[in-house]
Structure formats: C-alpha cells, structure tokens
Image: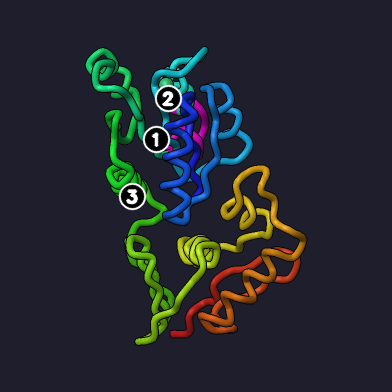
Amino acid sequence: MHILLIEDDPFIARAVTAALESEAHVVSYAASGREGLTEIAVRLPDAVLLDLGLPGMDGIDVLKTIRSKPEPISSLPVIVVTARESLDARLEGLDAGADDYILKPFHMSELIARLRAVMRRKGPLANEVLRHGKLSLNTVTHLCTKGSESVTLSKREYALLVALMTRPGAILSKRMIEEKLYAPGEEPEGNAIEYLIHALRNKIGRETIENIRGLGWRMRKEED
Ligand code: CA
C-alpha cells in the first residue's frame, strides 16, 4: 500500500518510513501540511499518517481540509500521531475526522497494527486473506499459497499481487502499478514492471494474470 507520512521531525520520519517499508508498503513523505495536501492531490495514497504539531498549517487543519474535499480524498483513512500532553486539547479536533490516533512515543509494531485495523475497517482490504482460485495471500503474515504449495515472493512481487488481488476485476495500468510500488523519485527502469509481472507469473501460474493490450493487467476471471 502507498502510505503518506506527514511529519516534520526527520528522525521520526526516517524510523516510521523504514518500519513501513519493511512491511512492503511504499511511503511518501511530506514535512508540512501544505506539502502533504499537494501530495494527496497528485498521488492519492491509500492511507495518511498525520502528525498534529506541524510548522505553518496545523495538523487539525490538514485533517479538516482532507475531509472537506470531494471523494475519494474525503474518505482517506487518516491516523493522527500526537504527543500525550496535546491530546486533550485536540480531542474535539480529532472528532473532526481521524480514523484513529496514536500517542508519541509509540512502538512501530503498534503503529503497524493500528494501520492494519484502520485499513481493514475502511477497505479496500476487507479481508486479511485475499483469494483467487487456488491462490491465497495473507496480508498480515505475507504468506502466499497456491493450493497446498507455498510461494515465496519478493517485497515488490508481494505488493504487486496485493494490488491485483484487492480489486480482482479491475485493470491496473503500468502507471498505476508504478505508483503503488515505487516511492516518488524512485522511478523504475523502462521494463521493470513487465519483468516483475513475468517473475510473478512464473511463481503463481502464467495464466493467473491477464494482459489487456494497451491498458494493463488484471487477475484472470475465475472459471466456475
Ligand atoms: Ca511535529
């Protein structure tokens, strides 16, 4: 998943980015509220982690701005990150639309668990286990199985398969896949996506992923 972190403390930002990347998420980073709102407008992330104490535009105002935008921005999952001492004063603001909040200092495992819970409530990952024919993919343990065989996936193969299996009928274009799998400034080489699709097909079955010429790829419709 693509997660936007809006946080002005570079030390926290680095730690959170590393923890989320180790969970196969793609993280983009904004050091101010305005930068964060621009990032949301340009590349709609799947979820936002929002620090409240930001320079310039306050985190609560960022949250209110997100909620005042049209869909799908207004319903973006947002987890607020705040220091305990400033929580009471801000509870009212949180009612303005945070999906959850987490107190600083926090353990990365707690942050990841909260994020998972929020995503589960809001979708599109309605289930922890995504299924397609004989293929199953557990988004908590990252285990992939095909029938009774287990399939070992690289971090990017895993992220690609989650993107494909989350919306089984939808066609993902090359650009959509790049945006889900690569952080800004980390642009993939020319045929990287095609190579990745090829590698994934070799592992889960060539017929599983269908190429729609000129448009992109999707999971092949299951035969009844
Ligand atoms: Ca801060």
Given residues 210 and 163, the one toward you in this image is 163
Q: Tell me if residue 93 comes above or below residue 128 in the rendering.
A: above
Q: Element type at marker 1?
A: strand
Secondary structure of the residue carrying tag 2 is helix
Asked if disc 2 and disc 1 are in contact, CB closer than 8 Å, the reply is: yes
Q: Is mark 1 within 8 Å of ligand 1?
A: no
- Identify the amino acid type marked 1: Val
Give the crowd class for mark 2: few <14, some 14-19, many >=20 residues within 10 Å: many
Which of the 4 quarters of the picture holds residue 138? bottom left
Give, as a single range, the part of the protein colored magenta: 67-76
Above-or-below relation of 200 to 129: below
What residue is drawn where x is 53% and y is 26%? 31
In percent of the image, x 74 and y 65: which residue is there? 191
* Amino acid type of the residue that numbered disc 2 sits on in the rendered structure: Leu
Q: Can residue 73 be seen in this view?
A: yes
Which amino acid is tagged 3? Arg
- Location of ligand 1 given as a quarter of the image: top left
The residue labelled by disc 3 is 116
Q: First in sequence: mark 2 or mark 1?
A: 2
Query: Percent from the top left, x then y, of residue 63?
Result: 42, 25
Dot 2 corresponds to which residue?
A: 63
Q: Is residue 169 visible?
A: no
Q: In this view, does 158 lie to the left or right of 202?
A: left
Confirm whether the magenta stretch covers residue 75: yes
Q: Mark 1 points at which residue?
A: 78
Query: Where does residue 217 sit, x and y in percent of width and height?
Result: 63, 68
How packed mark 1 is, by other alpha carbons closer than 10 Å (few <14, some 14-19, many 20 or more), is many
